[in-house]
Amino acid sequence: MKGNSYDVIVVGAGIAGLTSAAYLCRDGMRVLLCEREETCGGLVASFSQEGFMFDGGIRAFENSGIVFPMLKQLGIGMEVVSNPVSIGIGDFMVRLKSRESLRDYRDMLCANFPGNIQEIDAIIREIKKIMKYMDVIYGIDNPLFLDSMDDKGYLVKTLLPWLLKYKINIRKAGKLNEPVELYLKRFTKNQALTDMIIQHFFTGTPTFFALSYFGLYLDYSYPKGGTGVLVDKLKEYIEAHGGRILTGADITSIRPVDRQVLTAGGESFYYGKLVWCADMKALYNALDENQLSDMSLSRKVMEKKGQVLKGRGGNSILTVFISSGLKGAYYRETCGEHCFYTPSAAGLSSMKIPDWKEIAGDKDALFGWIKDYLRLTTYEISCPSLRDESLAPPNMTGVIVSTLFDYNLAKVIQKEGWYAEFKGLCAEYVIEVLNRSVFKGFSESLIRAICATPLTIEKNTGNAEGAITGWAFTNEILPAVNQFGDIKKAVYTPVPDIFQAGQWTFSPSGLPISILTGKLAAGAAGGGQTPGEI
């Protein structure tokens, strides 16, 4: 085999690509992992700023019967700590300690909406119902991450009974695919109440995905050293098992007949199989259509390419990374380690101008709209050093504050030449909103604040539209599998010997799905456990 030839080339060193490459290396494949950026990890990464460690993407891990079994199967040790989650509205804060905390959440909603108590109780019953589905679906470690099925006791007593319950409950969950904002209209006409429950989810989020999160919050954990530790562990595993990781390698051309990929820098590599774990639009832009000599194959590829290029990425986020001179105890008492906080119970539906597009050309009006949005939106607040004290200087705290934000709005602002001013405005106003609400008076202790936008995510990860969970739910045709029972099909492309994995292959996607599809694609490409054998 030539030096530039590999059994499998994996493109994209986000968590799906790292997982896929790790399993391929474990199976003895000669593997090349190509990443267009200079660092690996994508949306699972940490960075240091003046002694403060921040998580650049995902804030914590939900196991979902996938993350820890994957680490165990690969023999990777990673120390994790609990990641308590809080939910707050205005002056109320609920700490989620167990399933019983759902009563406290209910009481918080009732305190904010005393005229809607019966409706709130009906919604809580729906959440409880979905949590029961989750108990079954994630009731055991995913069997894909078991090395052997030789334990007959486990097979008969655990796996087979679970499979029966799983099939029933996954069908029930599949029926809850209606957008959650529409589903909740069956229970309440109070839009502000609906806002408090769902406005930190993307438009069109399926009901099951959104209302299941109360249970998932209890499943969160945090790796000592920051989320980027998972990336470091997988990189070490790949290189220790003979894999090669090439950063700064942007794959711009794929020649299926020659089984060749070319980088923007002019390097070429040959593959036996290819696993694409990067942006899906980049895959179809890179495919050399002249190499699809079979007319039937060419039609399939062109049809899929049309869907993919027309598709829109899901919502993105705006984040302010704050270096604070306050001790961790202050933040532990106010928001806790990880919090979803809404400063006002009025909800985003109360905005006078609901669509920024109506005022896009008026800078003052647009910036005023952004201020209203930041006053009413829901924030995800994470303090890494409350889980691991080493992640901030002594007696100081790093605070990460994020909210959903429209990529197209950020793009318009950039085009108008207002981008730097916009970032400064957002950092300043987010701090002002929090200073008036959950962190009263904390602005006096701030050392530094850095604002990142959807354009930052697009630049750093290559994700179209800065998307953080793959495709938007509002696409007319979703270019990805979106039924969990069909997830084994998600790793196949129309082109023979080219497979796919990651957040663009299944919708909605987070860390567990990226790992799961990475493992499935490795099985399909490497001749190990294939999707049909699960």
Image: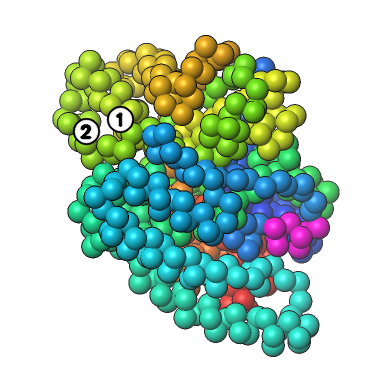
Compared with 30, 135 (above or below) is below
Reply yes or no: does residue 72 show up in magenta: yes
Q: Which residue is drawn at 30% across and 23% down?
A: 371
Q: Is residue 377 left or right of residue 221?
A: left
Q: In this view, does 417 lie to the left or right of 213?
A: left
Does the CB distance between marks 2 and 1 fall below 8 Å? Answer: yes
Crowding at mark 1 (Cα within 10 Å: few <14, some 14-19, many 20+): many
Q: Label 2 is placed on what type of residue?
A: Met
Q: What element carries label 1?
A: helix
Q: Which residue is drawn at 28% across and 60% down?
A: 118
Q: What element carries label 2?
A: loop
Q: Quadrant of residue 374?
A: top left
Q: Is 125 or 311 nearer to us in this picture?
A: 125
Q: Is 91 or 312 nearer to us in this picture?
A: 91
Q: Mark 1 = which residue?
A: 373
Q: Is residue 47 left or right of residue 91?
A: right
Q: Is 209 or 230 nearer to us in this picture?
A: 209
From which residue to which does the magenta span run? Answer: 68-75
Q: Is 55 or 165 nearer to us in this picture?
A: 165
Q: Which residue is drawn at 29% across and 46% down?
A: 113
Compared with 60, 402 (above or below) is above
Q: Which residue is drawn at 48% across and 71% down?
A: 133
Q: Main secondary structure of the magenta part?
A: helix
Q: Mark 2 = which residue?
A: 351
